[in-house]
Amino acid sequence: MKVQAQRLAVALLIYVVGVVCVAGTSYWLEKQRFMADIDARLLAAASNVPFILPADYHDIARTPHAISEEQDKKNLELMSQHARSGDLTYLYSYVMHEGKIYFTSCNYTEDDIKKDQVVTYWTSYPEGSQAYIDAMTSSDPMYVTAGDRWGLFRTILLPLKSPGGQPYVAAADMDITVIQQSLMRSILSFIGISLLLLLIAVPLVLAYRRTHAEMNKELLDLN
């Protein structure tokens, strides 16, 4: 009887470990699939920034007052239209000036307007991680998953140069909070259903073993 109990305990442990491993693998694979799709969309969006802004924009946008308010408003509207059409949260560009990051263009959202957080030309971005600084001298796109005052985003940082050779970065953000929550809910549901099945199965197995043991005992008594 003790041996049977030990075997059952081992079987239960293997089942639970298997459920956790399958859930973890499923979560990782689904997340990779979602991220690959998102990254492709972000790259396409960021690559369009040089065509949205004036051709020589970043040859000019190098000092705090280089861009007029009228031009900034026009850029804001154009960037916002493209961000909405691509289902992006933010589409923007930035430069480094005296070791700090400054937005040179950006879109706006309805929430930004309500919260009075619309980004205008030469808005400082102190929350920018080291990746934002590294992207200024990189030759390849950089992907970042991070949160700031605007939310949790998947971001592409695409290093570019203006026609005059000035370095800048075109970036696109997509809010992934809902996606992360959705994936996590799916995995937790899978684990919950698996454990529920286990709770149902264990009593059935125990009842079967008890019935089987009683039948064997009756047969032995008959003999």
Image: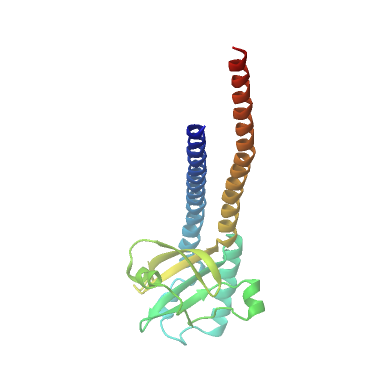
Identify the residue at image location x=60%, y=61%.
85
Identify the residue at image location x=50%, y=65%.
172
Locate residue 107: give its quadrant: bottom right
The quarter in which the C terminus is drawn is top right
Image height of 80 relative to 125, above or below: above
* Pick the front one: 78 or 156: 156
The x and y percentages for residue 130 are: 38, 72
Locate residue 135: give its quadrant: bottom left
Instruction: Locate residue 163 relative to residue 196 in the image: left or right.
Output: left
Scheme of image coloration: rainbow
Identify the residue at image location x=36%, y=81%.
99
The x and y percentages for residue 91 are: 52, 68
The x and y percentages for residue 104 are: 47, 77
* Pick the front one: 115 or 68: 115
Image height of 18 relative to 79, above or below: above
Q: Residue furthest top?
A: 223
Image height of 151 relative to 16, above or below: below
Identify the residue at image location x=39%, y=69%.
131
